[in-house]
Image (cartoon, rainbow, N blue to C red):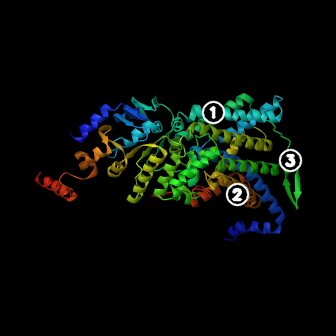
Amino acid sequence: MTTEAAELETKLKTPREKPLLAVNNIEVIYDHVILVLKGVSLEVPKGGIVALLGANGAGKSTTLKAISNLLRAERGDVTKGTIEYKGSRIDGLTPNDLVKRGVIQVMEGRHCFGHLTVEENLMTGAYTRTEGRAAIQRDLELVYGYFPRLKERRRSQAGYTSGGEQQMTAIGRALMSKPDMILLDEPSMGLAPQLVEEIFEIVVKLNREQGVSFLLAEQNTSIALRHAHYGYILENGRVVLDGSAETLRGNEDVKEFYLGIAAGGRKSFRDIKHYKRRKRWLA
Amino acid sequence: MDAIFDFLFGPLKEIWAYPTFFVEVVVGGLLTGVMYSLVALGFVLIFKASGVFNFAQGAMVLSAALSFVGFTELGVPQWLAMLLTLAMMVALAFVIERVVLRPLVNQAPIILFMATIGVTFFIDGFFQMLWGEDVKRLDIGIPKDPIEIHGVLVNTFDIVAAVVAGSLVATLAFFFQSTRIGRALRAVADDHQAAQSVGIPLQTIWVIVWSVAGIVALVAGIMWGSKLGVQFSLALVALKALPVLILGGFTSIPGAIIGGLIIGVGEKVAEVFWAEKIGGGIEDWFAYILALFFLMFRPQGLFGERIIERV
């Protein structure tokens, strides 16, 4: 019996626990005409880290924005399907409501408030909270515990901090809302490999220690699959493949198309070019 | 050559000869400048938080003054008239957000600007229909007699206006820097999408900003109204705020203050000492020339937010 079959069997035998987040067959249309998602379904279990993988324009960000409902601001609309969180439907709720319920998105490209200091940025994350200053101050210290670098730079304007510090600020800001689930969009974007590694390690740590579930969209398949538990691969607005991170890492197609490792060893870019040039000569 | 020299430097001799008079002119200019700042402040608040250049600010000043006088003429005591007008300005903010801003969210700034022009004419017309079109006197009991401080004659009213404007600015600065809502307002001003993503509701923020701008308009309206009388031309005071904004920067509260002072002093000094050389009456357009000159060298204004850009 192959590992995949074994996995399927255990999946069928164990009674299904209700997932924290369930996206069922959603369709998203921008500007009333452009169909971006053509039926995406996915689940995030409580305490899980789920990766949403795929190339540019596959629909990863759109899926996250459909969940956090930031889509409306970009003239996008969920036209079909449902989104459930903790068993109740959340499609149509405002981002403000969602943050209050514990779902918060960290946007692609960080989006820090450039003219606010790092600490003020973090404090804006606590906007929706009502439990008083002491609790919020405690969480601020908690965030500084995870990101000691931010504490050093707490008084600098966020616009003048480095890309890595901005990504940390953005994640820290989301943490200040005391979320159960963070939708993390492209955390590796524009960062040095070492920093990307650092950020992913913090994500795993937050998941383990604070019990925050993550749904993260990522182009860097290899690092995402090393840290996530489960993955979905999107192509042209559809889920084409899903499985545990381990299975996906072993999958031949994923290896070839997303990890750059072909069955016959690494393919050199030069070979491909050569081949194309020749073809044109013959034609 | 001599003529130019005389035009530029002749008045300086006059200034040198009568320093007390010069100080009087400058102080007078500063105090008028504070009043300009008051109007410019309303523009800055809304522009900062929603990126909308609110053409209707002048109309809001007029409508606030009209309502205040209207209520007192009905026999309502002044403190109550103030509260009622305040409530009206907040209600106006709600209506504008619901009817104009919300449907136009995410449209280009020029479209929002055009919408505020529409709002301007509506407010002008509606409030004049409500309270009548004739010139009204507004008197809140501030004495207008000049007093002498160290040999310099100053108008009491202008001093009161400056104190009021100063405390209003201090309050606003505290509100913006140190409160949760103020922080959220600044966050929205920086990046409204990100603000939304952390759960800051844009609609609420807009209502708050327009209400605050309404309150500023009320203060400006009462001050200007008791100086000039309450009539349609009060709305045109807002046009004087434009050079102030260009000078100080559209996004800076201190800029609006300093810009107002510079314009106030500049136009008074120019009028008193230079006007007769070219046949008088430069007070009305001097501010705009000054602003144009500034545009060429500092397009973001003296205190305009530096655009932080990094890759």
Identify the residue position indicated by label 2 in the image: B262
- The residue beneath circle 3 is B144
Residue in the foreground of this view, choosing between B274 and B74: B74
Disc 2, disc 3: CB below 8 Å? no
Q: Residues within 10 Å of mark 3 (few under 14, many from 20)?
A: some
Name the chain letter of the residue that bears numbered label 3.
Answer: B
Picture residue at 83% right of the left edge, 62% below the top: B21
- Any part of residue B234 in sight: yes
User: Badges 1 and 2: C-beta atoms under 8 Å apart?
Assistant: no
**Which amino acid is tagged 1?**
Phe
Say which quadrant the N terminus of chain B sits in. bottom right
Q: Residue at x 47, y 31 (%)?
A: A90
Marks 3 and 1 sit apart, C-alpha to C-alpha, by 36 Å
- Mark 1: few/some/many CA within 10 Å (<14, 14-19, 20+): many
The answer to whether B78 is drawn above or below residue A151 in the figure is above
Answer few, some or many: residues within 10 Å of disc 2's Cα (few below 14, many 20 plus, some between 14 and 19). many
Gap in angstroms between the C-alphas marked 2 and 3: 24 Å
Disc 1 is attached to a residue of which chain? Answer: B
**Secondary structure beneath label 1:** helix
Which x, y percent locates residue B16?
80, 69
| Image point (79%, 50%), residue name | B163
The image position of residue A199, as x and y in percent, is: 43, 54
Disc 3 on helix, strand or loop? loop
Please check whether the numbered discs 2 and 3 fall on a single chain. Answer: yes
Query: Where is residue A126 shown, x and y percent of the image?
Result: 57, 44
Distance Cα–Cα, label 1 vs label 2: 34 Å
Location of mark 1 (residue): B94
Evaluate whether label 3 is on the same chain as label 1: yes
B198 or A251: nearer the eye?
Answer: A251
- CB atoms of marks 3 and 1 within 8 Å: no
